[in-house]
Amino acid sequence: MRPRLAAVAMAGFIIAIGTTLIFLEASSGGLNPQDLDMESNPTGINASSEGAFDDIIKSQSEDHSMKWFYGDTTGGLKGVALVIHGLNLRPDRMQPLISELTGSGIDVLGLSLRGHGDNYAHIKDIAENQARLETFKNVSHQLWLNEAYLAYSQLKARGAAKDVPLFLTAFSLGGLIGLDLMASSADVKFDKLILFAPAIRLRPTIYLERVLSPFTHLVIPSMAPATYLANKKGTPIAAYNALFDTLNQFNQNADQKLNVPTLVFIDKQDEFIPLEKLKKLVAEKKWTRWQFYIVEKDKTAEKERFYHHIIDGSSTGKAVWRDMMAAMSAFLIK
């Protein structure tokens, strides 16, 4: 099924579910969400909740949410980059991008958001895939923002120690979270941004998931190729709620602080992110240091094209990917 037809079919599916599942309880199975007892503040962490802060650090350490990849420093370290993946995307699908960065002399800290990769509640006698999905059903905007803030803290410390600039390199939801973190946290600043289809503007069909917002454990099948999915059964409504909450906060806080050198990669046919609305937002905010790179996939791209995915040679085509990475490296290191 072509992506656009699939989107229409999915919209009908969501509306149908929304009108027939009124009797359902959101607690239909799954793990209980962690009560972190935190409120939003400029840093994304409640300074008065030291125990909760320590719990997150311990959880991240135990669940392997962060991993360093060290750059080729033959010509000297050029910077440190925080890499954040997209919604329900396997974090290891960001490896081609990470390899390009390390090959350019940049150290990379890869962040796996809760419910992705190894960042899930490991529970005895529960299979890995099930445990990851159950954890995914209990995510929130604040939880993901806290994880991003802790990752940034590590990035900042290494950047200061090596006296090199800080970069954000992120895809889709990851771009939204990184930008929201920078906009809402006084002590967070990246020197340059590389964004792949950032989810700071969404097509109207995506908002249909809001119909199901009370049913946080309900899982919606994904349009994306299965080889890219962190959770093959789909994406829980809790994760969509976290996406919308993050976008709402971003819209409230986005200002001139985000007007740093930024390169945005996007395909005009992206199923989720509308290019024209992105450009309109950039113009309205007067982010004059942002520039767009329009991706046009070639014949070697995956047969079943999914235009939102532009994160490796398989999804874009090898020649297109080489050109994208050359543009990224030139932008970061110039």
Image (spheres, rainbow, N blue to C red):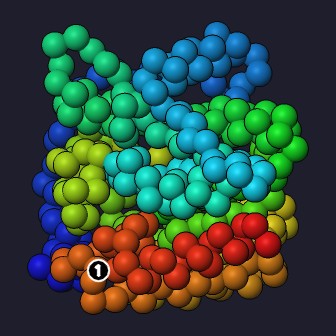
**Rendering coords of residue 171 (x, y %):** 50, 61
> For mark 1, what is the residue?
301
Please tell me which residue is depicted at 71% across the width and 52% down the height of the picture. Answer: 74
Q: Residues within 10 Å of mark 1 (few under 14, many from 20)?
A: many
- Specify the quadrant that holds the N terminus: bottom left
Q: Is residue 173 visible?
A: no
Look at the picture and state if 329 lies above or below 124.
below
* Residue type beneath disc 1: Ala
Give the quadrant of residue 6.
bottom left
On the image, the x and y values in percent for residue 75 come to 75, 56
Position of residue 86 measured from the top left corner of the image (x, y, whole percent): 44, 55
Question: What number of labels is visible?
Answer: 1
Residue placed furthest toward the front = 74
Quarter of the picture holding the C terminus: bottom right
Which one is nearer the viewer's eye here, 215 or 150?
150
Query: Which residue: 19% across, 57% down?
Result: 226
Q: Can residue 303 be seen in this view?
A: yes
Along the line of sight, the residue nearer the viewer: 93 or 19: 93
